[in-house]
């Protein structure tokens, strides 16, 4: 009789242990899923962040950076962009938000000096060929950004109708490099 109770207790304990293990595994899976979902990149909240994301995607794609190049390049490039932003903020604008001719010349000279300062660091991360390409890509990105803004202004003028190639109001170039603009959506 004692043996029967012991077997029942043993079976009950095994069932409880199995159930506990299933619950534990389920709990761990849900915690892992929550953590993964929390790490998904969020959409940028302002226009400046979105433009920087587009710049990074455009440069990464066009330079075809290897993981090792990216690890060496992006910290240097981010510091360069921060220095450029700080420099721009230090220039005084007139009430219309513009610089006068002397300010523009000073700004362009300081920008050139900054590029020269970072050139050797960029070459150490990328090599000379890719640095030459980088400086051209920055200009190309600004041109594409300007074209995109002009297209959006035209679309607003048309009430959001008839974008490029018959696209609707939100159609237009995106980063990625399909040759027509910034790339696929």
Image (cartoon, grey):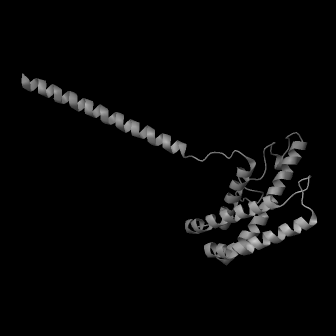
Q: Position of residue 146 (x, y in %)?
A: 83, 56
Quarter assignment of residue 121: bottom right
Q: Position of residue 39 (x, y in %)?
A: 54, 46
**Quadrant of the image containing the N terminus:** top left
Q: Residue at x 17, y 30 (%)?
A: 10
Q: Position of residue 84 (x, y in %)?
A: 75, 63
Q: Is residue 112 left or right of residue 95?
A: left
Q: How many marks?
A: 0
Residue 179, compared with residue 109, is above or below; it is above
Q: Residue at x 8, y 26 (%)?
A: 3
Q: Is residue 157 left or right of residue 55?
A: right
Q: Residue at x 60, y 65 (%)?
A: 70
Q: Is residue 68 left or right of residue 127?
A: left
Residue 71, compared with residue 94, is above or below; it is below
Q: Is residue 72 left or right of residue 36?
A: right
Residue positioned most to the top: 1
Q: Position of residue 128 (x, y in %)?
A: 67, 77
Q: Residue at x 80, y 45 (%)?
A: 167
Between 100 and 177, which is closer to the camera in this rendering? 100
Residue 32, compared with residue 115, is above or below; it is above
């Amino acid at each position: 009789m004692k043996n029967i109770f012991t077997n029942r207790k043993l079976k009950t304990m095994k069932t409880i242990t199995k159930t506990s293990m299933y619950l534990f595994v389920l709990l761990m899976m849900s915690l892992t899923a929550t953590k993964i979902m929390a790490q998904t990149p969020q959409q940028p909240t302002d226009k400046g962040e979105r433009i920087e994301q587009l710049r990074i995607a455009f440069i990464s794609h066009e330079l075809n950076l290897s993981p090792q190049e990216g690890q060496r390049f992006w910290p240097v490039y981010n510091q360069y962009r921060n220095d450029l932003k700080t420099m721009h903020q230090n220039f005084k604008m007139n009430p219309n938000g513009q610089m006068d001719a002397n300010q523009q010349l000073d700004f362009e000279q300081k920008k050139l000096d900054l590029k020269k300062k970072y050139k050797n660091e960029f070459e150490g991360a990328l090599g000379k060929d890719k640095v030459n390409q980088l400086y051209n890509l920055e200009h190309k990105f600004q041109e594409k950004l300007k074209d995109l803004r002009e297209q959006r202004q035209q679309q607003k003028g048309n009430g959001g109708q008839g974008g490029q190639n018959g696209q609707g109001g939100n159609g237009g170039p995106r980063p990625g490099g399909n040759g027509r603009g910034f790339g696929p959506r």
